[in-house]
Amino acid sequence: MATIQFPEEPNPEEDANAITTTVKVWGCRGSIPRSEPNMVKYGGSTSCVEFLSSSGTRVVLDMGSGSYGLGQHMIGQYFGGGPDGKARNSGGNILITHTHWDHIQGFPFFVPLFIPGMTWDVYGPRGSAGSIRDSLSGQMQYDYFPVNLNYLGADIRYHDLTEGEFYLGGERPSPPPSTAASSINTDGDDNKKDEDDSDSDAEAETFCQEIGGDVRVTTHYLHHPCLTLGYRLEDTKTKVTLCYITDHEPYDMRMGTEGYTPSDVLSARTADDRHVDFIAGCDLLLHDTQYTAAQYKDKITWGHSTVEYVVDVALAAGVRRLGLFHHDPMRFDEQVEELVQLAKDRVEKRREDFANTACSDLEVFAAYDKQELVMERKSGRLRSSVLSRRSSNVSAISEPGGPSPSEEFCGNVALIFKDSSAAEPIASLLRVGCDVQIYTDAEEALSVAEKDKPSLYLVQQENGGEMTGVDFCRKVRELSEWGMEVPILVETNDHETLDSIRSDAEDAEVTDFVSKPYSPEYVRTKAHIAMSRSQCRWRKAVLPSDELVRLETLRDTGLLDSKPEERFDRLTRIASRAMDVPVAVVSLVDDSRQWFKSCHGLCAVETPRDQAFCAHAILQDNVFLIQDATKDDRFADNPLVTGGLVRFYAGIPLSITGKDRRKHRIGTLCLIDTRPRDLDAEGMRMLEDLGKLVEYEVEVSMASEQGKKAAAA
């Protein structure tokens, strides 16, 4: 049994109470199960991995044939009982990457699904073929399997996923009832308020608004002919992260043979760069390595990675440990070991190329059936990712009453091709759920754009007219607000052409690219991903114009990652009580996170900057007010909103003098409520006054920090 340990300062008390996250591989073969004498060491079961958090939350990744062994193991524990005589392992969570057969074929044979009293939540991507429940049900129809899905005895709930974020495990308490009106009441009965004080104080002491649960799950679309999700799992207690990436092909298919090379310009990041961002800093990466570079030339568009590409992205992402996964069904044990040696040689060959990001002790191994990995962290401190990994933008779970997959991908899709016959294979696939119009003239398509308002465009860069694909995109963006939001994919003849237009395409805000060679299935998947992303009602805050100096000023305060201090906690308690909100926070907006110097009523230390309302608040001088985030297109799909944590927000920026003797907004004093409400003029003034008191304390900290540096010098 392999163990991953993270070096920290020794602490006897922590050693005695070490907490662990366990990952067990139940199947790692790709495409089809194999049972051969020369496959005994690495196994022949198809994809299934078990993630067991330090708090006991079970997550099963994929339901290939390996899930049969997991099911038998769980049944033994369930009926065997624990030390207290009670049944163990009463269920868990299943995350399906996609519905190709080798990832779901074990589902009908997973015995825990048949046991009354067990509870399972099944998650998977919603696509054009139907919901995740529909897909799983399809392989259990009587023509293929003797038992229908409806006869499973366990309590099973199905959840369709898109790209985003959600939490598993743990319980979040409900906030106490409000004791005041939706705005601050300065004319009310003071005596009545005094009578309620003791009760509200007691509630404030016991209520702590929590963010998330035991396991934070982030989803990211992969590059595969079928709609496929990659998963990033973080144990919120140990802070250990697993990235599970199976069935993924390099977006730039040249990288399948040549390896990964990051883009030169940060602002023009490629899809492969964003793949690196998603896995950045993870402790364990299980990644599809079905092919070698030499084999890949005959497997292009089949939807799988090469070991050379995967080693490179692992080095670029600062991964600690890399497990080669989804072994080719034709690869014997000896050949898997050769693949491991090839990967290790690649690490040494490319380490210097990624010297700024590569983990110095990156370990490479091949996953095998029944392999158990115990990942241990001896400190609760979160290790920063080597690269800046942007968080997801939306809740990944589709709302129960939301649109069906056929509704989600419906709309008017416009294809602009020089030759209509070349567009027809793509159009025939997209017509399942979409109305498709083919144009051979970009000018004609532009002339009816405002009238038809397509849900998506796919336009050839060289489409036979004077207007290129990038030019068309630029003109559509100039039309209206709809034109700014509609997804536009540009098709190029090859990746070299894409390289030559990438800068112009970024300026024109091209959504994505489709470069030959490709299959119609690939294009359909890209179109569905683009339409799904375009429906997001959430906008990330732009960076302030003084971002670099602002960050320098923030760090000069010496407050980031400092211990709690009563002088700040006192102010958030006063703000919460005076403004009658359950949550008040002093938030400092760092480069990729907002870090909480003080929280009242909030059990959290930080959140990603992309989710931070405060990142918007620091863009203005006065109070930033959101009365009901669910009705605001800038925030409605924010995970903090969809998770029921934020409805009302009011934040006053904290302006601090930097070395350039100018004021820079480093964070906020903010108020949060789980109910919609308003803030009147007097409330605004009170929040501004409290913000000035917080600014004073920050200035004191900065002066103290400068004094320490001067004394040390």
Image (cartoon, rainbow, N blue to C red):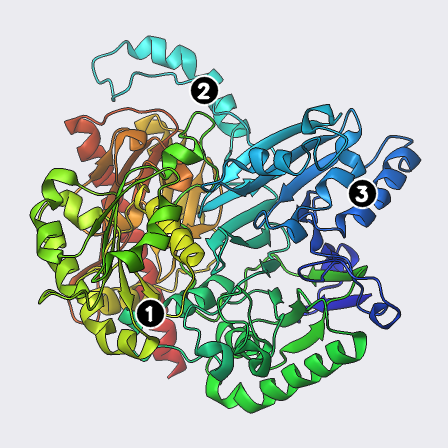
In space, the residues marked 2 and 1 are separated at their CA atoms by 50 Å
Where's the N terminus, which quadrant? bottom right
**What is the three-letter code of the residue carrying label 3?**
Gly
Can residue 611 be seen from the camera position used here? no
Residue holding disc 1: 269
The residue nearer to you, when weighing 527 against 434, is 434
User: In terms of secondary structure, where does tag 1 sit?
Assistant: loop
Q: Position of residue 570 (x, y in %)?
A: 40, 40
- Crowd class of label 3 (few under 14; some 14 to 19; many from 20; radius 10 Å): some
Element type at mark 2? helix
Q: Residue 345, how many percent across, how many down?
A: 63, 88
Q: Quadrant of residue 410?
A: top left
* Other residues around mark 2 within 10 Å, as few (<14) / some (14–19) / many (≥20): some
Which numbered disc, 2 or 1, marks the residue closer to the eye? 1
Q: Residue at x 69, y 56 (%)?
A: 47
Residue at 60% x, 66% y is: 287
Classify residue 335 as left or right of residue 178: right
Name the residue nearer the viewer: 612 or 341. Answer: 341
> Mark 3 — residue?
71
- Residue 307 has which mark? none
- Looking at the image, is mark 2 or mark 1 earlier in the sequence? 2
Residue 401 in view: yes
Asked if labels 1 and 2 touch by Cβ distance under 8 angstroms, the answer is: no
Residue drawn at (68%, 24%) of the image: 150
234 left or right, relative to 640 = right
Q: Is residue 85 above or below residue 524?
A: above
Residue type beneath disc 2: Ser
In the depicted structure, whether residue 51 falls above or below residue 645 = below
Q: Is residue 85 left or right of residue 135?
A: right
Q: Which residue is mark 2?
A: 200
